Image: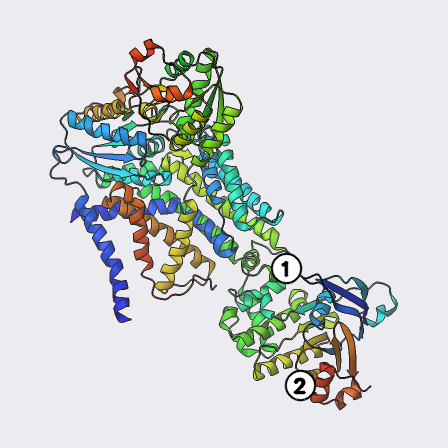
């Protein structure tokens, strides 16, 4: 279980007002599940992500990580490998470097790079190509030696999402069982087709065993993808819909909940 | 749009071709080998250097050499960028000149490096040619291939002047830019000479023209009785600031050469830079006539002339003893400083 | 016609030699400006630092190799200073470079024993052995003409420059080099992927300033002196070399897609720039207009550029 307990995070605006980005927020997540977070801008989704991946420390509350069933009762447990893809995925991109070099970057994440060995070797290129093929992004596989910026923005984003998700796998060849993937509106600037590809990728990554939390505005995506939808407003959890309730919810219904209507249940 | 592209594409080859043609035209003709060709490598525009250059030209003319008629001079300058020195030196060496005149220390060093053993060199405007590595002694060495004039100053006479005009002087303020080789040399020479005369040199470092005023003010605050300005290029560039402070505080300013007395300094025993330029011309002609440079000792100036400025004396609260006035080569009374 | 050819040969000779002497500075700018996106002003202090260290070492009679090694180490120290000011004290990139350059202006004089200028004239230098070749080639090939070319010296510089280039290319293509490049393009991402960009900046700047110092050491031996004012204008020279190289290669359609190509472009840039200067000098422009003509010539060379593409990397 990933237990988010009573997290609060308060920011002070430039005019002195104190804004609660997160207000005693609590949520429990089962490892391996796919949760969609919804909520208007400023509802706290990004803040939550930043607290989860350690960029921000909460003013109060805590996060308890028990990602494997065995450690359910232990006091401490390893924090999973957390990959956070921010709202502008290209913030994690190197515009002038090739796809292969990006993947090399991620591969080197866990160890000190050597300056006596060549970076992008033929062996590595083959490996990267194979990985990209495996995940169904053939066109990226074919242009693995091309610069990132020669891809369309949509494909760049998809690549970054994949790259982040694959981090540990590339570096250590570890099974992704303990990975937590945080995706902050990954489809926001994608067109219909690319959005679909991105979601396929997310599903695939989820199927491999990762825990996925995806934040989005789009109710259709939420309903297509999720096993569970959590709605935030003003830093609080206002709705938590799963299972039967979820299948019963219509897009319009979900949209109205997000907008502020009270949830019937 | 095609018109624009044409202009652009034609521009470069045209410029390059023009320059190369000009270059070919300007290189000396081998056929008229009778006329000696001399390369002059200068540092850049500067009051003292300009005096040297002018008197050099006059000196040549006085000895019967007219540029363009029976001698050809190629003028080059590094324009204040020492990294251009080797390029300038090389270009002169490659122009088949018969001799090279180099002005200032770094330029002379670069010329010595490129030309020694190939083309005779006459340096000028180098205060200390020995520590600059140009010659091994003031007497020079046969076979060195280089000789020249040094503007080593009559520091002893200038310090004596201080004692005569300001008998109560104990501390002598010395503003200078430590980045200038000439000034560093001046300081090393002046300190022991001053000590002999019961004077203490108080240096104040500047790095640029803007610092000069502040440096002189700080010297005044520290209670020096006189300011001594040497050949430092930076301080000379800011000489007006020196005078301003000096007049305000009635502080005498002894300078190093006559141009600055004219500008408003109190007095000096000056190396006559006109004589320096003239001597350089003389050395050059001797070398062109076949004399081996290494056999010519470096020319320095022992006898210096006294220059006084009466208006400055009034402003600085000094009276010139009549004997001194009689000895002076020139007494200025108009001032250019405001 | 022979005059013209001789003039041309002289320009090529001088331009190549000077270009190779200053190549280290161009490589330094590749590393700092292009790779790390760090306009490094401190080379105006570390270039003369290398010269000062070399001059002092050679004056004591040490072999030229020692002069180079010490100069390189000194340059590293300079780069680390700049890097530390930026990374640890949080100074801006420009300011850190300016501080280092200012500090070294005084430090260089101290190294030269309190002098602003030290000759490198009657000592054994790296060039000594090659100058012997220059002389013998002259007596062998063209003894009658009063020309002086420097095939030996050019060869000597080439050895050094090619060695430096190969090392730099290798490092930039290595694993370390990939991370280094990343630091220059997106520091935040580098951090997100688990590396500390600060350390890479320190190392990168140390290398860049070592290159500048090595060039300074070579320049002192070439020029015949080490002067505390040598650093002035070195940064502009480096920038011109790099940018000129990029523009030229882009215009001529030559690849810029690998570290080797980028350094090649910078080397071409510095050599061409020096050839332009040599041309202007040779042409005999009035002495005070040297830089004016040099500037105009550069404009002409840049005018070759057809596309208005920004100078970017794409390796």
- Badge 1 crowding class, 10 Å Cα cut-off, few under 14, some 14 to 19, many 20 or more, is some
Asked whether the residues under marks 2 and 1 belong to the same chain, the reply is no
Q: Is residue A203 left or right of residue C27?
A: right
Residue C45 image position (x, y, % from top left): 48, 40
Q: Residue lying at the far top in this picture: please name it.
A: B323
- Classify mark 1: helix, strand or loop: helix
Label 2 sits on residue: A220
Q: Chain of mark 2?
A: A
Q: In the image, C245: left or right of B62? A: right
Q: Nearer the viewer, residue A194 or B3?
A: B3
> How far across and how far down the image is residue C96, in percent?
55, 46
Q: Circle 1 is placed at which residue position?
A: C191
Marks 2/1: CA–CA distance = 34 Å
Q: Say which quarter of the image contains residue B33.
A: top left
At 59% from the left edge and 45% from the top edge, which residue is drawn? C85
Query: Looking at the image, which is closer to me, C287 or B287?
Result: C287
Q: Secondary structure beneath disc 2?
A: helix
Nearer the observer, disc 2 or disc 1? 2
Mark 2: few, some, or many residues within 10 Å (few <14, many ≥20)?
A: some
Q: How is the image coloured?
A: rainbow
Nearer to the camera, C36 or A98? C36
**Where in the figure is residue B247, as x and y percent of width and height?**
43, 25
In the image, what residue occupies the spot 53% across and 23% down? B222
Q: Chain of mark 1?
A: C
In the image, residue C121 above or below residue C71: above
Residue at x-position 29% and y-position 35%: B42
The numbered mark at residue B63 is: none
Asked if residue C113 can be seen in this view, the reply is no
């Amino acid at each position: 279980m990933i237990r988010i307990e009573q997290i609060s995070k308060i920011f002070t605006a430039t005019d002195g007002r104190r804004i609660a980005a997160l207000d005693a927020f609590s949520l429990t997540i089962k490892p391996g599940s796919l949760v969609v977070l919804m909520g208007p801008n400023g509802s706290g989704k990004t803040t939550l992500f930043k607290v989860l991946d350690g960029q921000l420390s909460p003013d109060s509350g805590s996060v308890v990580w028990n990602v494997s069933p065995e450690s359910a009762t232990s006091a401490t447990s390893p924090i999973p490998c957390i990959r956070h893809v921010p709202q502008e995925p290209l913030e994690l991109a190197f515009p002038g470097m090739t796809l292969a070099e990006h993947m090399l970057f991620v591969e080197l994440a866990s160890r000190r790079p050597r300056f006596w060995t060549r970076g992008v070797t033929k062996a590595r290129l083959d490996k990267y190509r194979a990985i990209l093929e495996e995940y169904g992004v053939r066109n990226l596989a074919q242009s693995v030696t091309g610069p990132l910026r020669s891809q369309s923005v949509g494909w760049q984003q998809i690549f970054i999402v994949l790259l982040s998700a694959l981090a540990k796998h590339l570096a250590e060849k570890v099974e992704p069982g303990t990975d937590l993937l945080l995706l902050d509106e990954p489809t926001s600037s994608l067109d219909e087709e690319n959005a679909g590809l991105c979601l396929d990728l997310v599903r695939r990554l989820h199927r491999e065993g990762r825990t996925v939390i995806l934040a989005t505005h789009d109710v259709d995506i939420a309903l297509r993808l999720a096993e569970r939808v959590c709605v935030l407003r003003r830093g609080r959890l206002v709705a938590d819909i799963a299972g039967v309730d979820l299948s019963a919810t219509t897009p319009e219904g979900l949209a109205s909940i997000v907008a502020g209507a009270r949830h019937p249940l | 749009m095609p018109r624009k592209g044409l202009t652009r594409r034609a521009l470069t080859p045209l410029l390059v071709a023009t320059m190369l043609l000009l270059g070919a035209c300007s290189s000396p003709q081998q056929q008229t080998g009778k006329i000696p060709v001399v390369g002059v490598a200068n540092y850049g525009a500067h009051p003292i250097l300009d005096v040297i250059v002018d008197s050099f030209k006059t000196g040549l003319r006085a000895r019967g050499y007219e540029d363009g008629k029976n001698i050809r001079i190629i003028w080059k300058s590094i324009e204040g960028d020492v990294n251009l020195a080797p390029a300038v030196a090389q270009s002169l060496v490659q122009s088949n000149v018969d001799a090279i005149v180099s002005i200032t220390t770094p330029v002379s060093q670069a010329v010595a490096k490129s030309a020694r053993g190939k083309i005779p060199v006459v340096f000028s405007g180098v205060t200390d040619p020995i520590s600059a590595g140009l010659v091994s002694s003031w007497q020079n060495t046969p076979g060195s291939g280089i000789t020249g004039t040094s503007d080593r100053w009559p520091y002893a006479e200038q310090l004596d002047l201080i004692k005569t005009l300001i008998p109560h002087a104990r501390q002598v303020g010395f503003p200078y830019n430590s980045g200038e080789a000439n000034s560093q040399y001046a300081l090393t020479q002046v300190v022991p000479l001053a000590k002999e005369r019961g004077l203490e040199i108080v240096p104040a470092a500047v790095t640029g023209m803007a610092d000069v005023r502040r440096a002189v003010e700080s010297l005044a605050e520290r209670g020096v009785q006189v300011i001594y300005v040497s050949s430092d290029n930076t301080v000379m560039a800011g000489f007006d600031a020196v005078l301003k402070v000096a007049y305000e505080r009635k502080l005498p300013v002894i300078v190093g050469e006559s141009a600055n007395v004219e500008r408003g300094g109190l007095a000096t025993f000056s190396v006559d830079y006109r004589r320096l330029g003239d001597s350089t011309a003389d050395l050059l002609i001797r070398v062109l006539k076949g004399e081996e440079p290494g056999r010519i000792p470096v020319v320095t100036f022992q006898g210096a002339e006294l220059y006084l400025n009466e208006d400055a004396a009034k402003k600085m609260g000094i009276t010139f003893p009549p004997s001194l006035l009689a000895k002076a080569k020139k007494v200025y009374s108009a001032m250019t400083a405001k | 016609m022979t005059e013209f050819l001789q003039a041309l040969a002289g320009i090529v000779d001088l331009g190549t030699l000077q270009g190779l002497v200053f190549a280290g500075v161009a490589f330094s700018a590749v590393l700092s400006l292009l790779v790390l996106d760090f306009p490094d002003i401190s080379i105006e202090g570390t270039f003369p630092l290398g010269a000062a260290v070399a001059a002092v070492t050679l004056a004591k009679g040490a072999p030229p190799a020692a002069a180079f090694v010490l100069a390189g180490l000194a340059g590293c120290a300079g780069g680390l200073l700049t890097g530390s000011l930026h990374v640890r004290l949080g100074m801006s990139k420009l300011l850190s470079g300016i501080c280092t350059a200012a500090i070294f202006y005084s430090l260089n004089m101290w190294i030269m024993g309190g002098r602003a200028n030290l000759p490198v004239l009657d000592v054994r230098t790296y060039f000594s052995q090659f100058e012997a070749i220059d002389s013998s080639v002259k007596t062998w090939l063209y003894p009658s003409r009063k020309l002086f070319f420097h095939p030996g010296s050019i060869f000597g510089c080439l050895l050094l420059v090619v060695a430096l280039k190969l090392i730099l290319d290798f490092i930039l293509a290595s694993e370390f080099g990939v991370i280094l490049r990343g630091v220059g393009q997106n520091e935040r991402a580098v951090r997100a992927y688990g590396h500390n960009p600060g350390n890479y900046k320190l190392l990168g700047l140390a290398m860049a300033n070592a290159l500048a110092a090595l060039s300074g050491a070579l320049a002192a031996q070439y020029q015949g002196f080490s002067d505390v004012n040598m650093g002035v204008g070195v940064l502009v020279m480096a920038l011109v070399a790099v940018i000129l190289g990029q523009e030229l290669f882009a215009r001529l359609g030559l690849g810029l897609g690998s570290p080797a190509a980028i350094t090649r472009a910078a080397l071409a840039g510095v050599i061409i720039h020096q050839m332009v200067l040599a041309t202007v000098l040779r042409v005999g422009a009035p002495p005070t207009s040297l830089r004016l003509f040099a500037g105009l010539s550069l404009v002409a060379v840049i005018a070759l550029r057809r596309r208005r593409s920004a100078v970017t990397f794409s390796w």
